[in-house]
Amino acid sequence: MNILITGAQFANKGAQSMLFTVISKVRDRYPDAEFYYLPLDYFRKGCFDRCGEYRMHFVYDDLIMNDYPTRYGVIGKLKRRKDMNSAAEAMRGKNVLFLSEIWDRLDALIDISGYSLTSKFGISSINRIVRHINKAKSMGMSVIFMPQSYGPLNFGENTENVCRTIREALCKVDLLFAREKQGIDVLVNECGVKNAVLSPDTVLQAREIKTEHIFTGEHEVSVQRLDTAGAVGIIPNTETLKNGDRAFVLDCYRQIIGTLREKGREVFIFRHSEDLQLCRDIYALVSEDEHCHLIEDELDCLAYGEFVKQFDFVVASRFHSVVHAYKEGIPALVLGWAVKYQELTALFAQGDYAFDITKAESCDLDKMKDRLCSLCDNHARESQVIKDKLEDILRESCFDKCWEVLDKI
């Protein structure tokens, strides 16, 4: 069985963990499965440099420029496509495959995007997804969309046409999972798509990631060990700055860390994904306190899961930093910016610990600090609640439905 994985990347550790989770679970059931990995971050320097370390074939989408609208200019598009394909030709020496050349060897497409079907990132991401679905189905392939977020879909005067295009593509998908009820509402009400099934995030639906299914050789997960008890982790997200007021967001962290220090907690600030500069900015506010620490190491998704076990709880803003914490039974004060945070925390009976810090006018800092103090005192109890809820999720995994589709190949 040959499976194309779309919507993945390594730079974002949530995307990386969804990729690893799917490969690990599928290879548990189908040991001979071959994976073809189509990275979203194909443009990053070094994206294809480590092909030999992983049990997957790296693929470059040589038609990606066709997804960009004509307003970028025909000449500009052709020049960029020429530049990209010239660079791609150099990849052949690194065992990188071209997507246009491998469709006939594929049996299934599994999309693991966390958030792509939305107008927030422009029309090109919509075009890419629709193109992949239509090509896969024309080749007789099975198509599965793992749990992800959808919407909003606001394309101005083009909204009706775009939603019709999305409906025509998604109705061909064999399995379509949405991780939030709001996402299902968007698909039903705006696109007329009625085959979506509500299911929690992919990472929560596997007990472990087996490294032998992912890497070609031995892979040791090594993390810094904290020589302290009662530690609390701070894991910010630059999206809160893009969607909110920078001064307010930074002041929230300053007050949160001040409250933690009043409670005698040791504080560690670190990144889950691409948020190092924000970590540094927060640390600059408290750097004179010897009990506040900045960790600049980059952790892959496996190392993060191991590292986060050392904390009583975390103050987290990256969606998958919360997901990974919950997977290890670690509570979180969640500083979100989208509805997915509310639905995730509600799923684990943790809604009282979720705040939207992008809405300064309605964010109650006193209530936030009160909830923070509650976690300081009751983290063990909340940890057990999270572990119990996780067991409920694992009993009805979305992978059980995936097997019904993949068993037919």
Image (cartoon, rainbow, N blue to C red):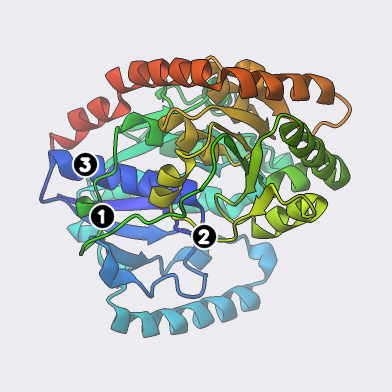
SS under mark 3:
helix
Q: Is residue 242 above or below residue 352?
A: below
Q: Is residue 254 above or below residue 347?
A: below
x and y, in percent, of residue 349 in the image: 53, 14
Mark 1 neighbour class, 10 Å CA radius: few under 14, some 14 to 19, many 20 or more? many
Mark 3 neighbour class, 10 Å CA radius: few under 14, some 14 to 19, many 20 or more? many
SS under mark 1:
loop
Q: At 18% from the left edge and 37% from the top edge, which residue is drawn?
A: 406
Q: Nearer the viewer, residue 239 or 150?
A: 239
Residue wearing tag 3: 26
Q: Earlier along the polypeptide chain: callout 3 or callout 2?
A: 3
- The amino acid on which the numbered mark 3 sits, given as a three-letter code, is Val
Mark 2 neighbour class, 10 Å CA radius: few under 14, some 14 to 19, many 20 or more? some
Residue wearing tag 1: 214
- Is residue 338 toward the left or the right of residue 181 in the image? right
Q: CA distance from mark 3 to mark 2?
A: 27 Å
For residue 99, say whether it is visible: no
- The amino acid on which the numbered mark 2 sits, given as a three-letter code, is Glu
Pointer 1 with pointer 3, Cβ within 8 A? no
SS under mark 2:
loop
Q: At 57% from the left edge and 77% from the top edge, which residue is drawn?
A: 80
In front of the other: label 3 or label 2?
A: 2
